[in-house]
Image (cartoon, rainbow, N blue to C red):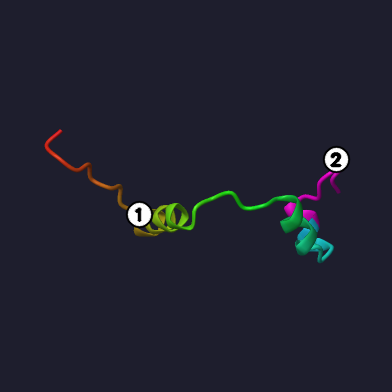
Amino acid sequence: MSTGKYISLEEAREKDKLKRFIKEHPNKAKKKDFEDLLDAMCKGEPKKPKGGG
């Protein structure tokens, strides 16, 4: 169990309080950045730098 002010993700999942967790931890990411990162992680190959170096 968490002892602080905010609920942990694990605690929120166990106690079915995901809405509270979402309210306490707002999303500040950009959707495009996240999707690009996820795509790169799923492909498993590093991006090659553009240009001649």
**SS at mark 1?**
loop
**Nearest-to-viewer mark from 1 and 2:** 2
Tell me the tag on residue 52.
none
Does residue 36 appear to the left or right of 28 in the view shown?
left
Which residue is tagged 1?
44
Residue 9 colored in magenta in the image: yes
In the current view of this chain or complex, which residue is farthest to the bottom? 16
Residue 29 colored in magenta in the image: no
Vertical relation: 49 (above or below) 7 = above
Vertical relation: 35 (above or below) 51 = below
**SS at mark 2?**
loop
Q: Residues within 10 Å of mark 2 (few under 14, many from 20)?
A: few
Q: Earlier in the sequence, mark 1 or mark 2?
A: 2
Vertical relation: 46 (above or below) 38 = above
Does residue 6 appear to the left or right of 39 in the view shown?
right
> Which amino acid lies under the numbered mark 1 shown in the image of this protein?
Gly
Does residue 28 appear to the left or right of 23 in the view shown?
left
Q: Position of residue 30 (x, y in %)?
A: 49, 53
Residue at (81% x, 66% y) in the render: 16
> Which amino acid lies under the numbered mark 2 shown in the image of this protein?
Gly
Residue at (28% x, 48% y) in the render: 47
Which residue is tagged 2?
4
Label 1 vs label 2: CA separation? Answer: 37 Å
Q: Position of residue 43 (x, y in %)?
A: 34, 58
Report the span colored magenta: 1-11
Q: Nearer the viewer, residue 20 or 9?
A: 20
Task: Please name the predominant secondary structure of the magenta segment in the image.
Answer: loop
Residue at (80% x, 59% y) in the render: 20
**Where, quadrant-wise, is the C terminus in this rendering?**
top left
